[in-house]
Amino acid sequence: MSDRVPMTQAGYKKIKDRIRQMEEVEMPAITEKIAEARAEGDLKENAEYHAQRENQGQLQAKISMERAKLSKADIIDPSKINQNEVSFGATVTLVDLDTEEEEEITLVGAGEEDYDQGHYLVTSPFGQGLLGRKKGEEVEIDVPQGTLAFRIVEIDYSYLDG
């Protein structure tokens, strides 16, 4: 699989906004707390100072991870997607072959995932199991709990329209 991270322009902007928030709001707040803790004196036993330094490191790691996503971004042009098969941006209506329950998932890129809302990363095992499939096909997807079997009922690309 490619190093590229597929995403919409909106997903790209969401990640950029998140980085800006961390760099311009959260990081200065932590830096200020470090300065306040440093002013209290002995740093060896200053728990607040050490906690804020740890927070600073964790935030910097988050910023680096988000920047890495942007550096690998592959902005998808919706007009170039074959809408007869499951691809990035598809909202797929599935029927679970065991329970006959219907569910709807949308395959999204980095920055847009929200599993509670049914927005799955296209690069996830579930997303990869659906890619290239067509309406009416049955598909088995391996997940940690075992193998799930579905029938694809509908494929819709209105999610990419905004």
Image (cartoon, grey):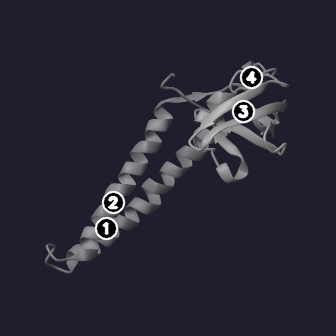
Amino acid type shown at disc 3:
Gly
Residue for point 81% across, 31% down: 151
Q: Do the residues labelled 2 and 4 touch (CB within 8 Å)?
A: no
> Mark 2 or 4 closer to N-term?
2
Disc 1 element: helix
Instruction: Determine which residue is flagged by label 4.
Output: 133
Q: What's the distance in space between the residues labelled 4 and 1, CA to CA? A: 49 Å
Which callout, 3 or 2, points at the residue further toward the start of the chain?
A: 2
Q: How crowded is mark 3: few (under 14 residues within 10 Å), some or many (20 or more)?
A: many
- Where does label 2 land, which residue? 56
Nearer the viewer's eye, disc 3 or disc 2? 3
The residue closer to the viewer here, 136 or 32, is 136
For discs 4 and 1, the disc positioned in front in the rendered view: 4
At a point 36% along the width and 52% down the height, the residue shown is 60
Name the kind of residue labelled 4 in the image.
Arg
Q: Give the CA distance from mark 1 to mark 3.
A: 40 Å
- What kind of element bears circle 2? helix
Asked if marks 1 and 2 touch (Cβ < 8 Å), the reply is: yes
Label 1, on which residue?
52
The earlier-in-sequence mark between 4 and 1 is: 1
Q: What element carries label 4?
A: loop
User: Which residue corresponds to mark 3?
Assistant: 89
Q: Can residue 136 be seen in this view?
A: yes
CA separation, marks 2 and 4?
Answer: 44 Å
Q: What residue type is labelled 2?
A: Gln
Q: Is residue 156 visible?
A: no
- Outermost residue toward the bottom? 40
Q: Earlier in the sequence, mark 1 or mark 3?
A: 1
